């Protein structure tokens, strides 16, 4: 699914960027140009970052248990 239509950035690309260390929309803007067009994707991109970080953290916690 496309998150940033202006720059044709998909959710999977954002998740991969988070896995590489992006933690903010500014990080995504620098790496993928997310939010540098019309800006309507910024809130969803921020939520996707938070969700992916939470899911990743939970996965690691379950694996460690």
Image (cartoon, rainbow, N blue to C red):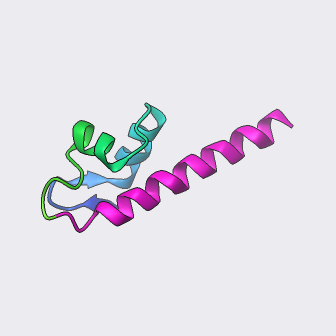
- Given the current orientation, which residue lies at the most extreme bottom position? 40
- Apparent side of residue 50 relative to residue 10 in the rendered image (left or right): right
Q: Residue at x 16, y 53 (%)?
A: 36
Along the viewing direction, whichever of 55 and 47 lies nearer the viewer = 47
Q: Residue at x 45, y 61 (%)?
A: 47
Q: How many marks?
A: 0
Seen in the picture, residue 7 relative to 13 is either above or below; the reply is below
Task: Please tell me in which quadrant of the rendered image residue 44 appears.
Answer: bottom left
> Looking at the rendering, in which quadrant would you find the C terminus?
top right
Along the viewing direction, whichever of 50 and 19 lies nearer the viewer = 50
Q: What percent of the width, then of the height, locates residue 46?
A: 40, 57
Task: Please tell me in which quadrant of the rendered image residue 11 appears.
Answer: bottom left
Q: What percent of the width, then of the height, locates residue 4?
A: 24, 59
Q: Residue at x 12, y 58 (%)?
A: 37
Say whether residue 4 is magenta.
no
Along the viewing direction, whichever of 8 and 38 lies nearer the viewer = 38
Task: Please tell me in which quadrant of the rendered image residue 43 appears.
Answer: bottom left
Seen in the picture, residue 39 relative to 59 is either above or below; the reply is below
Q: Which residues are magenta?
A: 39-65
Q: What percent of the width, then of the height, locates residue 58?
A: 70, 47
- Given the current orientation, which residue lies at the most extreme right position? 65
């Amino acid at each position: 699914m496309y998150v940033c239509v202006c720059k044709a950035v998909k959710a999977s690309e954002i998740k991969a960027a988070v896995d590489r260390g992006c933690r903010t929309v500014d990080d995504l803007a620098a790496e993928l140009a997310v939010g540098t067009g019309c800006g309507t994707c910024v809130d969803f991109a921020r939520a996707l970052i938070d969700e992916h970080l939470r899911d990743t953290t939970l996965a690691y916690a379950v694996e460690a248990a």
